């Protein structure tokens, strides 16, 4: 019997670590003793493990992940016994190997013998072990759900997406009944069905998949214990492939929300037509990842958010927008700035979302209050000192009003200077001292004063 430790780095995440849950099933099947921990916990490295697995997620979690790997290195006899897998491990394999000397397993565990040469078990095909989640204090927001795949991979190759590197082969059908029943038999029925498919609409077996979903108790209007059940293709569906027929099929399930991507304003007509299609089939609860900081502009981003609110007013839909900042596939932090954005505009979006508790209101009236009534107003808000954006009510009649006034009176060259300053980072005393125009100086002074208020608030 081997002693095995499964580690998920300490960052916050919504979904339980499916890969580790399957590894737990694998090692329990092998008769091994399995423990699970989230983050760096001293008691778990005071003993020696036969094997430690560390899961990885986005590459921008590089620091937290490397810190975790290094933390547990002394709890194995040799670095070879510490195995790293998952998304970041696939994208940055050699970087991790160079930095730590551990064993990195890229891609999926979808063949036998990857972990133990004499084993015939395919880890990826195992029923995930939900029990390990009970052993930690961290509560994943998604817990009472079957987490499964009806397909794997994606036939497309969008430039900003890592799917074809992680799951290079598109599998049209992965039997859901086996996965769902397998979980139910051991852990009892779950409320919701979360499907991690990357592009289910590209599947030749789409009709069969929908049939499976319905037969598993997730037909439209289905309830469990008096509560509505929910099917969520959490990676979204591809608007280009959403035909009337496929929409009609989706509408026979308990899908909520229906997630459709709206990555660029050039997709406007297609996107709007697909939302109309959903409304026609009475699928009214929609959700929309709005990619920004890629090749888009701030105006393009604003318009996409606004279109969702306008569609809600017109069609009676509830489209919730989730701005998603683009970060290059292999970036080790989140500092990337797209060609049409600057640091302040990006921070401005984050401050607006802080003020609205992370929500983009589906109602036009509240959206306009937060993001402005026009793309120009949005840009003005996003350029304001952060403190003025986050605590808008508090400052709107004094500091913020004066700042807006001066901002509107800036000459074109002065605006360019302001953008250059923001491209560099924060407004500092040095910028202020270098400026000769009294009005421009006063504008810069607002940033310095607002930073002081923000700093005092934090202490
Ligand atoms: S369609 Fe979606 S999953 Fe497929 S490559 Fe593009 S972004 Fe990735």
Image (spheres, rainbow, N blue to C red):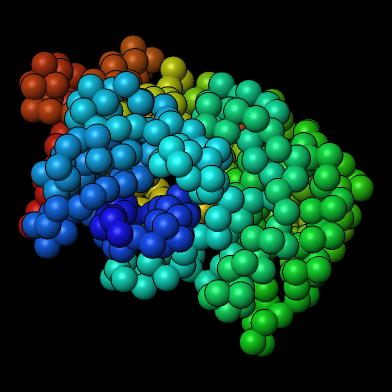
Residue 232 locus on image (x, y percent): 64, 58
Q: Quadrant of ligand 1?
A: top right
Q: Quadrant of residue 438?
A: top left
Q: Is residue 141 above or below residue 234?
A: below
Q: Is residue 430 left or right of residue 414?
A: left
Residue drawn at 71 percent across, 58 percent down = 176
Q: Quadrant of residue 254?
A: bottom right
Residue drawn at 65 percent across, 30 percent down = 169
Q: Is residue 220 left or right of residue 187?
A: right
Q: Tell which residue pokes out farthest to the right in this image.
A: 245
Number of numbered markers: 0
Name the quarter where the C terminus is drawn: bottom left
Residue drawn at 46 percent across, 20 percent down = 340
Residue 53 locus on image (x, y percent): 31, 47
Q: Tell which residue pokes out farthest to the front in this image.
A: 118
Residue drawn at 81 percent across, 56 percent down = 210
- Which one is nearer the viewer's eye here, 323 or 417? 323
Q: Tell which residue pokes out farthest to the bottom in this image.
A: 226
- Which one is nearer the viewer's eye here, 322 or 201? 201
Q: Is residue 201 above or below residue 8?
A: above
Q: Is residue 349 above or below residue 281?
A: above
- Which one is nearer the viewer's eye here, 28 or 247? 28
Name the quarter where the N terminus is drawn: bottom left
User: Residue 251, can we see it?
Assistant: no
- Which one is nearer the viewer's eye here, 304 or 212? 212
Residue 377 locus on image (x, y percent): 48, 38
User: Residue 22, can we see it?
Assistant: yes
Residue 248 locus on image (x, y percent): 88, 55
């Amino acid at each position: 019997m081997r002693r095995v430790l499964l580690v998920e780095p300490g960052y916050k995440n919504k979904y339980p670590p499916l890969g580790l849950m399957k590894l737990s099933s694998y090692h329990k099947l092998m008769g091994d003793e399995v423990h699970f921990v989230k983050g760096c916990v001293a008691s778990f490295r005071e003993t020696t493990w036969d094997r430690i697995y560390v899961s990885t997620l986005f590459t921008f979690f590089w620091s937290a992940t490397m810190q975790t790997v290094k933390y547990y290195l002394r709890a194995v006899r040799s670095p070879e016994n510490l195995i790293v897998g998952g998304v970041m491990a696939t994208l940055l394999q050699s970087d991790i190997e160079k930095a730590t000397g551990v064993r990195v397993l890229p891609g999926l565990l979808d063949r036998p013998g990857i972990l133990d040469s004499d084993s015939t078990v395919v880890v990826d095909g195992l029923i995930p072990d939900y029990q390990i989640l009970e052993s930690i204090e961290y509560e994943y927001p998604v817990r009472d759900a079957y987490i499964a795949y009806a397909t794997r991979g994606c036939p497309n190759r969008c430039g900003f997406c890592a799917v074809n590197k992680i799951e290079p082969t598109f599998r049209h059908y992965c039997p859901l009944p086996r996965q769902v029943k397998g979980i139910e038999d051991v852990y009892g029925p779950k409320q919701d069905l979360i499907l991690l498919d990357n592009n289910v609409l590209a599947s030749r077996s789409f009709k069969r998949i929908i049939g499976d979903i319905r037969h598993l108790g997730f037909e439209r209007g289905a309830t469990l214990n008096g509560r509505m059940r929910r099917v969520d293709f959490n990676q979204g569906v591809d608007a280009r492939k959403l035909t009337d027929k496929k929409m009609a099929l989706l509408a026979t399930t308990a899908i909520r929300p229906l997630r459709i991507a709206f990555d660029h304003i050039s997709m406007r007509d297609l996107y709007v037509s697909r939302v109309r299609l959903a409304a026609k089939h009475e699928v009214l609860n929609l959700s929309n990842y709005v990619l920004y900081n890629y090749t888009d502009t701030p105006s393009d981003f604003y318009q996409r958010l606004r279109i969702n609110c306008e569609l809600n007013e017109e069609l009676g839909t509830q489209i919730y927008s989730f701005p998603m900042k683009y970060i290059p596939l292999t970036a080790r932090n989140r500092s990337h700035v797209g060609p049409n954005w600057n640091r302040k505009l990006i921070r401005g979006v984050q401050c607006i979302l802080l003020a609205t508790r992370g929500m983009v209101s589906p109602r036009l009236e509240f959206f306009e209050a937060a993001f402005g009534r026009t793309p120009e107003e949005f840009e003005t808000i996003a350029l304001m000192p952060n403190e003025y954006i986050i605590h808008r009510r508090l400052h709107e009649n004094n500091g913020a009003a004066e700042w807006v006034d001066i901002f509107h009176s800036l000459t074109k060259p002065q605006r360019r200077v302001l953008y250059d300053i923001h491209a560099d980072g924060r407004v500092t005393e040095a910028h202020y001292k270098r400026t000769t125009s009294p009005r421009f100086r006063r504008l810069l002074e607002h940033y310095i004063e607002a930073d002081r208020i923000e700093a005092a608030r934090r202490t």
